[in-house]
Image (cartoon, rainbow, N blue to C red):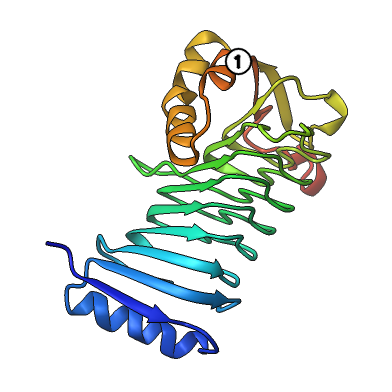
Amino acid sequence: MENELVINAEGMHYTPLNKAIRSAVAKGTEKIRIEHVLGQRFIADGLKGRVKITVHGTPGGDLGMFMSGPSIEVFGNCDHAPGNTMDGGEIIIHGSAGDATAHSMRGGLVMVRDDIGYRGGIHMKEYGDHRPVLIIGGNACAFLGEYMAGGLVLVLGSGEKRVLPNRGIGSGIHGGLIIIRGDVPDQTLGVGAKKSRATEEEKRLIDPYIRRYAAVYGRDPKPLLDDEYTIITPSSGRPFANKYTWE
């Protein structure tokens, strides 16, 4: 039987909150429920293991930074950079997230039910079997996937008022994939990015992620599975070579 710790974080500074989390994990606690969260930063940063954490409220910046293994489910919105440099595990957000979501992420999954801010997925990277995935159920602001070096960013645009990500998509991208539901206007592409219509084989790649999104948030997957997608990839391995060197 799983043992669970409940923490009331009302008015608590992030330092004692994180000490309580680490102490519980060291003692073998398998589930942690944190209630009344309001802006505490760095929750579960650098945490390892298989503990499941539920966060009720609005966590502050850098949720799960450097985390490797645990799963976090947030019932609320997130401030900036959830999943910053995350190595493994999952962050599931029942709301929206701020700027730099999944910043420099190098493994695991970050899934956001609604929208994210600017520079989502900036400098995501992959190596070996570590391939980070960022799923955005709604839309993203400018410079999505900036300087991206690996991994997958999937934008489903499933909100009632569907809006495409705005300018600078994939600016400086030199690895990985950005896949966006529907067409993407040429003028929204960043420097070093190119687009094409996703093939059936490429759509099969995102099939399990769409089904997971629909299952977690209680959505019908069929309209998302049946629609067309645009895939954005690097146009070269050195998108800014002509700006800094003479060749």
Q: Residue at x 64, y 53 (%)?
A: 96
Q: Is residue 147 above or below residue 2?
A: above
Q: Quadrant of the N terminus?
A: bottom left
Q: Position of residue 67 (x, y in %)?
A: 39, 64
Q: Horizontal placement of 18 versus 113: left or right?
A: left
Q: Residue furthest top?
A: 200
User: What residue occupies the far right of the structure in this picture?
Assistant: 187
Q: Nearer the viewer, residue 7 or 229?
A: 7
User: Up-down: is 115 above or below 187?
Assistant: below
Quadrant into which the C terminus falls: top right
Question: Would you place residue 22 above or below residue 88 in this image?
Answer: below
Q: Amino acid at mark 1?
A: Ala
| Image location of residue 205, percent across then percent down | 45, 22
Image quarter for residue 223? top right
Provide residue 80's location: percent of width, then percent of height.
64, 64
**Left or right: 57 as drawn, with respect to 167:** left
Q: Residues within 10 Å of mark 1 (few under 14, many from 20)?
A: some
> Which of the two residues, 162 or 174, is positioned nearer the viewer here?
162
Q: Would you identify the image quadrant in which residue 171 lies?
A: top right
Residue nearest the viewer, comparing 247 with 196: 196
Q: How many tags in the picture?
A: 1
Residue drawn at (47%, 82%) of the image: 9
Q: Residue at x 22, y 66 (%)?
A: 30
Residue 183 percent location from the top left of the image:
75, 20
Q: Is residue 65 visible?
A: no
Q: Residue at point 61% right, 48% down?
A: 121
Asked whether residue 153 is in view, the answer is: yes
- Image quadrant assignment for residue 81: bottom right
Q: Is label 1 in a helix, a strand or a loop? A: loop
Tag 1 residue: 198
